[in-house]
Amino acid sequence: MAVYNIYFSPTGGTKRVGDILSDALSKEYKRIDLIKRQVIDCRLESEDLAVISLPAFGGRVPDIAARRFSALSANGTRAVIAAVFGNRAVDDTLLEMYDLASAAGFKVIGGVEAVAEHSLVREYGAGRPDSEDESELLELAKKLAAKLENNDLSAPELPGKRPYREFKPSAMSLLVGDGCVDCKKCALSCPVEAIPVQNVKTVDKDKCFSCMHCVSICPKGARQNSPELIKALAERLREPCRERKQNKLYI
């Protein structure tokens, strides 16, 4: 049996959730990083297990993550899906992940809601997943392992509605400071190629969906969002993000 840790993680939080769950279910696993611009030539078989972790953007799966995940081919592969959110809500993300996984040939046996630091307003879910989250996720993984041990392939009841909620991603006003050394790491790593290699201080706003990957990987910390826009967004999210949200299991 091969175990696959599949994730799309622009700022690292979703990857950490996937790592915790994957480590708990198997000490040896293969990684599939969907944020990389690579052709995925991989067919997963029925005896394999996949831990699939995707972020919730406005309560939905980001379009580029959905398209890259759909390029995978499974053959009844058992799967655990984890929707990772910035301490607000997953809304329809888990249900959309279930539909994407089923269409790709996976057999979903469990779903997880997991909290990570908000990619835009870092004060919400700051530092998560933290040690408390890790303990919670390890307990959830034990229940998933027990279900797998019993060869229980029943589908979980997941939150969400069809049709999914409407979400229109938009580009943030990214500022590039004098610390930029034109290393082009941001342009070469952008999952949607929104940053021109010839001029990394500009962004194609028709492509950018504010995943913040370029901000998180800049070696000089030269990229940031407009403080005014972040302040306004923080105020809008203050009430729904006020309390610490917990990780949940659907099995």
Image (tube, grey):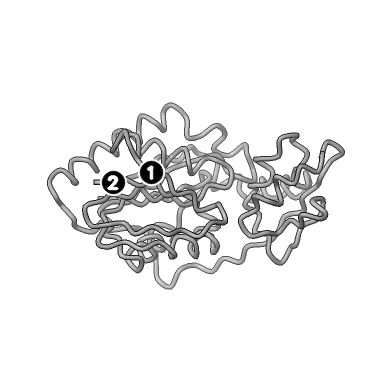
- Please determine whether, in this image, residue 128 is positioned above or below residue 120: above
Q: Give residue 119's position: percent from left, percent from top.
A: 60, 45
| Identity of the residue drawn at 64% across and 49% down | 189
Q: Residue furthest bottom?
A: 163
Front residue of this view, candidates 159 and 34: 34
Q: Give residue 121's position: percent from left, percent from top.
A: 64, 43
Relative placement, left or right, of 158 versus 193 is: left
Q: CA distance from mark 2 to mark 1?
A: 8 Å
Secondary structure beneath dot 2 equals loop
Q: Residue furthest left?
A: 150
**Dot 2 and dot 1 residues touching (CB under 8 Å):** yes
Q: Give residue 201's position: percent from left, percent from top.
A: 82, 50
| Identity of the residue drawn at 39% across and 45% down | 5
Q: Quadrant of residue 101?
A: bottom left
Q: Which residue is mark 1?
A: 30
Q: Which residue is mark 2?
A: 2
Please, what is the three-letter code of the amino acid marked with disc 2? Ala
The number of callouts visible is 2
Relative placement, left or right, of 26 versus 165 is: left
